[in-house]
Image (tube, rainbow, N blue to C red):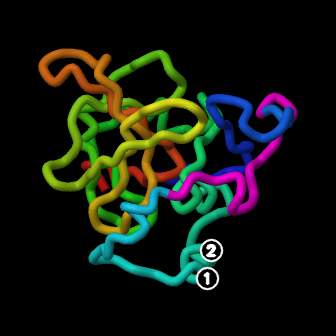
Amino acid sequence: MRCGGSAPIWEPADPFGGQSAAAGFVPDGPEQTRKDTDMDAKTYPVTRTDAEWRAMLSPEQYQVMRGHGTERPGSCALLHEKRPGTFTCAGCGQPLFIAGQKFESGTGWPSFDTPVEGAVETTEDRSHGMVRTECHCSQCGSHLGHVFPDGPPPTGLRYCINGVAMDFEPDDA
């Protein structure tokens, strides 16, 4: 299962000069997306040109995964996925999260307490006047979402992930 419909991209603040997410504004330019120089400078095992990324991803996926955007809360069917299986990176297919680690956070984004070991890396994100921890795929560097220290035991972490950045592979497939 894949998300990637036509829902506008949502941003947590209004850093775009009064054009709000409520108006359906979709960030669409280098001046409107965050670039993490440390992450962008790293070489990943899976690499593609910008043209290849644009060809394989939907516009929404590209904006989130390569432009560090955020999908609208509640806009992806993966939020409600309950079957046993694995959530994989939509950019490279790497397993990211096991369904048993998913929990209902009430935020509108799929949330997990633990990633597959070695699958998710983090960097500091100082965009939009906030300090957060961004998480991205360790194989292709695609932006997945953010991790917060308000999750359930035993980890206390909440990996808040954009559904468009993932595919779901059910165990019974």
User: Which residue is disc 1 drawn over?
Assistant: 51
Q: Between residue 55 and residue 149, name the one nearer to us.
A: 149
> In the rendered structure, which segment of residues is drawn in magenta?
21-35
Position of 104 compared to 165: left or right?
left
x, y (%) of residue 28?
Answer: 75, 57
What whole-number distance in Å separates the C-alpha atoms at marks 1 and 2? 5 Å
Majority secondary structure of magenta residues: loop
**Image mark count:** 2
Relative to 77, say whether 120 is above or below: below
Q: What residue is drawn where x is 61% and y is 82%?
A: 51
Q: Quadrant of residue 30?
A: bottom right
Q: Is residue 1 magenta?
A: no
Q: Amino acid at mark 2?
A: Arg
Q: Between residue 111 and residue 99, name the one nearer to us.
A: 111
Q: Quadrant of residue 108?
A: top right
- Mark 1 and mark 2 residues within 8 Å of each other at the beta carbon: yes
Position of 161 compared to 15: left or right?
left
User: Which residue is disc 2 drawn over?
Assistant: 54
Q: Secondary structure at mark 1?
A: helix
